[in-house]
């Protein structure tokens, strides 16, 4: 049984080594999630160290998929704090360990992110993803709407730059 839920700050801290490893494996496997391979332990750890305070202060929701105590995947919901954006949140860094992919965990994490957004009173979600990646198809299947495409948005490991697709999703208000 896979447990998919929002981590408390203490849980996030306890999963820190696994989060570092998940980010490194995912980047080194070729994902376009902000970093280029090879991602050092130090840089991955520094990233999560910046994320954790947001989990503690409620500005960010970190959802993990855990099976037998092992972290298999995660996704984040960044809750916008600006006065004109308090109905909005951004999905960041959906990732699943390569050996756990294709079992529906990515989709389940995204459904959990929807629930967390509703709970936080957010009604508009946004994200961007590299054009052509598995994730693009996943978001379409889950009902996200394409807002547009930006060519050459993100540098890649081959020395080129890839297009990104911007998506949004409207959530009916809870209740
Ligand atoms: C995107 C990602 C999180 C999906 O995770 P997942 O647990 O494999 O997701 P699911 O199993 O719910 O769906 C994966 C899709 O790939 C297909 N698939 C089948 N076998 C697969 C396999 N062995 N590996 C990967 N995908 C597979 C699934 O059928 C599904 O396609 P569908 O959406 O058209 O039905 C994962 O591929 C990943 O970590 N990618 C790298 C990070 C990344 O690009 N994140 C997105 C940032 S915006």
Image (cartoon, rainbow, N blue to C red):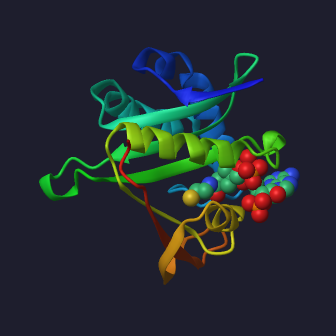
Q: Quadrant of ligand 1?
A: bottom right
Where is 68 relative to 83, above or below?
Answer: above
**Nearer to us in this view, 141 or 77:** 141
The structure residue drawn at horizontal position 47% and vertical position 19%, both measured from the top left corner, is 13
Q: Position of residue 18 (x, y in %)?
A: 63, 26
Q: Quadrant of the C terminus?
A: top left
The structure residue drawn at horizontal position 68% and vertical position 61%, both measured from the top left corner, is 138
Kindly give the residue lying farthest to the bottom in the view shown: 151
Query: Can residue 95 be seen in the rendering of this structure?
Result: yes
The structure residue drawn at horizontal position 38% and vertical position 44%, both measured from the top left corner, is 174
Q: Position of residue 92 (x, y in %)?
A: 48, 51
Where is 41 relative to 153, above or below?
Answer: above
Q: Quadrant of the N terminus?
A: top right
Kindly give the residue lying farthest to the front in the view shown: 175
The structure residue drawn at horizontal position 33% and vertical position 48%, both measured from the top left corner, is 122
Relative to 25, 174 lies left or right? left
Q: Position of residue 121 (x, y in %)?
A: 31, 43
Tally the marks. Answer: 0
Relative to 52, 99 lies left or right? right
Relative to 20, 58 lies left or right? left
**Nearer to us in this view, 10 or 1:** 1
Q: Position of residue 39 (x, y in %)?
A: 59, 46
Q: Looking at the rendering, which quadrant does residue 137 occupy?
A: bottom right
Query: Can residue 37 be seen in the rendering of this structure?
Result: no
**Nearer to us in this view, 152 or 74:** 74
């Amino acid at each position: 049984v896979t447990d998919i839920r929002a981590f408390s700050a203490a849980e996030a801290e306890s999963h820190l080594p696994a989060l570092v490893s998940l980010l490194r494996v995912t980047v080194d496997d070729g994902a376009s999630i902000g970093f280029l391979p090879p991602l050092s332990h130090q840089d991955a750890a520094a990233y999560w160290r910046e994320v954790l305070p947001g989990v503690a202060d409620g500005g960010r929701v970190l959802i993990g998929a855990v099976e037998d105590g092992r972290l298999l995947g995660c996704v984040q919901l960044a809750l916008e704090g600006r006065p004109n954006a308090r109905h909005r949140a951004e999905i960041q860094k959906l990732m699943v360990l390569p050996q756990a992919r294709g079992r529906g965990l990515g989709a389940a994490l995204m459904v959990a992110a929807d629930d967390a957004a509703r709970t936080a009173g957010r009604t508009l979600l946004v994200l961007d993803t590299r054009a052509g990646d598995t994730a693009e198809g996943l978001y379409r299947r889950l009902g996200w709407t394409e807002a547009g495409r930006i060519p050459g948005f993100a540098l890649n490991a081959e020395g080129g730059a890839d297009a990104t697709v911007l998506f949004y999703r409207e959530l009916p208000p809870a209740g």
